[in-house]
Image: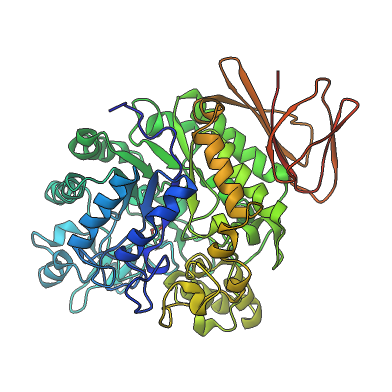
């Protein structure tokens, strides 16, 4: 097999709970995924990442795993999974699974044993420390808010959790634990999967001082993101992990490594890097503007995107590494709402995002529903929200004195549940996702935004995505998109995100006008139109005119 077998593939992320319910109990399942493989194939997808589907009490929707060798029965059985692998292979689709090994569930037998004997064999699989007086061992704040420490009843000990208290962190310093993890990974690789997305991998190495730092908020705590993330020494764990598992299968890995600086890319994704790829979160989170106040919604400019985007593109290129390019995932609001901030969107706006997602250097990742322009959900009340993180953020906002209506507005925009609403397949009840009431709210716009409607329309967003994927993966321009270099162009144009892709003698320009105004560019040679969201190009007398939110791909000779 070619070493970089993954380089010309587009990945599609499936959130299994919300993709397709073939058994009609209101929850998506593996049989449902099998039913839709032909849909993915037609779209041009050759690799699918399935979000965590292991046995789990579902406190964090499956990212709290209680048995790594079993599949949550709501999704199906191991036999269904084997069918899925076979059916996917027939269609030349590779499967990636989620690997959630920074933490497990408090219902995992390791943790249950640890609770019974915190200082014993299984106690050391976790991070357990004595408090100071009646206080936790330090003042670190977890990702979902509150202390990272939870008392162990009947003792003066606490255990550590980066996320909810039902997700105790695993102690990677323990060799037995590490070997257990390698066994799990190899078990799934032997079943024929192509690789993994590595969940929350930034947190596996803890700052060994475990000391308290100056508080950054009135709660007296300090964010984990500033004291114990991507901590030096993590590469030692990652190297061993790679050698004992992924290397043996030439597997594809993509890391969720937030806050990774472009300066460090060579270590993590270079030719001798620790992963195949890492998500580029810098530009994905442009709306957060580095603020820790998640409930502040910021609009952003082309410049806010271009600065981090081209910095990371350049760094990845320098070390011959591949970034994973995503605008959406199961933890993000829908990209249309993020980028265009209203409630209804034009074809041009949605297709603008498609061009951005599919023409950069790296591996494009699409999230289910993005290809038909699914949007944030029209939430009515907080009680409709299922996501543990959103609920804890909502409480935090109220504690911080935010008006409940404002807090709800913020949640309604940023909640991860926006990405998790059922996939809109047709205009039938429950959007054709299930015949039974789905586990979470269906977006009320399903009658106008759905797959069936777009499949038969050559001018739909879905058809545009197909054309773009075809252009990137199976056209005379494939190598320029999948292997070509990238340079930012027209840097002086504040409203443009623009770049040149070059492979041997082929040269492509991609221009994205992220503004409501026209933008004029001097081009002395007539560009050769390839694809665009206006389906045409306005070029006259050496001037190329880009219309509002125009995204244009052309060849330059
Ligand atoms: C990752 C997942 C997210 C989950 C968290 C804890 O960030 O993407 O959904 O809540 O890890 O596992």
Viewer-nearest residue: 213 or 402 = 402
Front residue of this view, candidates 538 and 125 = 538
Query: In which quadrant is the N terminus drawn?
Result: top left
* x and y percentages locating residue 98 in the rendered image: 32, 53
Compared with residue 339, is residue 7 higher up or lower down, i.e. above or below? above
Residue 170 rendering spot, x and y as whole percentages: 24, 56
* Quarter of the rendering containing residue 32: bottom left
Left or right: where does residue 195 sit relative to residue 111? Answer: right
Query: Residue at horizontal 60%, vertical 73%?
Result: 447
Q: Quadrant of ligand 1?
A: bottom left
Count of labels in the image: 0
Residue pictured at 65% horizontal, 38% vertical:
307
Image quadrant in which you'd find residue 437: bottom left
Residue 83: percent from left, percent from top: 23, 56
Q: Is residue 208 visible?
A: no
Q: Position of residue 253 (x, y in %)?
A: 34, 41
Give the side of residue 477 with respect to residue 141, left or right.
Answer: right
How is the model colour-coded? rainbow
> Can residue 494 be seen by looking at this rendering?
yes
**Who's the residue at 54% across and 78% down the image?**
399
Decide: is 528 above or below 240.
above
- Left or right of 518: which side holds 36? left
């Amino acid at each position: 097999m070619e070493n970089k077998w993954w380089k010309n593939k587009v990945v599609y992320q499936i959130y299994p709970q919300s993709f397709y319910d073939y058994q009609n109990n209101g929850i998506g399942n593996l049989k449902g995924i099998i039913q839709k493989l032909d849909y993915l194939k037609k779209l041009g997808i050759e690799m699918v990442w399935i979000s965590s589907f292991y046995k789990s009490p579902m406190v964090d929707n499956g990212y709290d795993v209680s048995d790594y060798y079993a599949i949550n029965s709501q999704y199906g059985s191991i036999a269904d999974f084997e069918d899925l692998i076979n059916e996917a292979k027939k269609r030349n689709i590779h499967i990636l699974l989620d690997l959630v090994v920074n933490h497990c569930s408090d219902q995992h037998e390791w943790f249950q044993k640890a609770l019974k004997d915190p200082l014993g064999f299984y106690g050391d699989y976790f991070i357990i420390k004595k408090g100071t007086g009646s206080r936790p061992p330090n003042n670190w704040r977890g990702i979902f808010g509150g202390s990272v420490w939870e008392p162990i009843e009947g003792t003066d000990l606490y255990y550590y959790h980066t996320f909810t208290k039902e997700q105790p962190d695993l102690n990677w310093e323990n060799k037995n634990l590490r070997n257990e993890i390698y066994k799990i990974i190899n078990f799934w690789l032997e079943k024929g999967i192509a690789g993994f997305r590595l969940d929350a991998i930034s947190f596996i190495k803890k700052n060994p001082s475990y000391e308290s730092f100056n508080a950054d908020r009135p709660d007296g705590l300090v964010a984990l993101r500033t004291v114990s993330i991507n901590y030096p020494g993590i590469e030692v764990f990652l190297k061993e992990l790679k050698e004992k598992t992924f290397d043996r299968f030439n597997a594809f890995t993509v890391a969720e490594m937030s806050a990774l600086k472009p300066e460090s890319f060579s270590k993590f994704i270079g030719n001798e890097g620790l992963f195949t790829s890492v998500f580029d979160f810098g530009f994905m989170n442009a709306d957060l503007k580095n603020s820790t106040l998640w409930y502040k919604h910021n609009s952003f400019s082309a410049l806010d995107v271009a600065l981090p985007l081209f910095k990371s593109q350049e760094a990845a290129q320098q070390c011959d590494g591949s970034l994973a390019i995503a605008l959406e995932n199961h933890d993000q609001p829908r990209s249309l709402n993020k980028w265009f901030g209203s409630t209804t969107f034009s074809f041009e706006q949605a297709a603008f995002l498609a061009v951005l997602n599919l023409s950069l250097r790296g591996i494009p990742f699409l999230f289910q529903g993005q290809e038909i322009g699914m949007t944030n959900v029209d939430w009515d009340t907080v009680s409709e929200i299922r996501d543990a993180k959103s609920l804890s953020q909502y409480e935090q906002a109220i504690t911080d004195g935010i008006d409940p209506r404002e807090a709800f507005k913020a949640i309604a925009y940023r909640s991860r549940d926006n990405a998790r609403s059922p996939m809109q397949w047709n205009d039938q009840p429950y959007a054709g996702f299930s015949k039974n009431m789905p586990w979470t709210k269906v977006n009320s716009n399903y009658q106008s935004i759905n797959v069936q409607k777009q499949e038969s329309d050559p001018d739909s967003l879905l058809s545009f995505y197909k054309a773009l994927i075809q252009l990137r993966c199976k056209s005379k321009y494939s190598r320029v998109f999948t292997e070509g270099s990238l340079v930012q162009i027209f840097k002086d144009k504040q409203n443009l995100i623009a770049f040149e892709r070059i492979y041997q003698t082929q040269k492509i320009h991609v221009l994205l006008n992220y503004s409501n105004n026209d933008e004029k560019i001097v081009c002395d040679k007539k560009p050769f139109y390839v694809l665009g969201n206006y389906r045409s190009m306005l070029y006259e007398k050496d001037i190329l005119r880009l219309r509002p939110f125009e995204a244009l791909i052309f060849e330059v000779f």
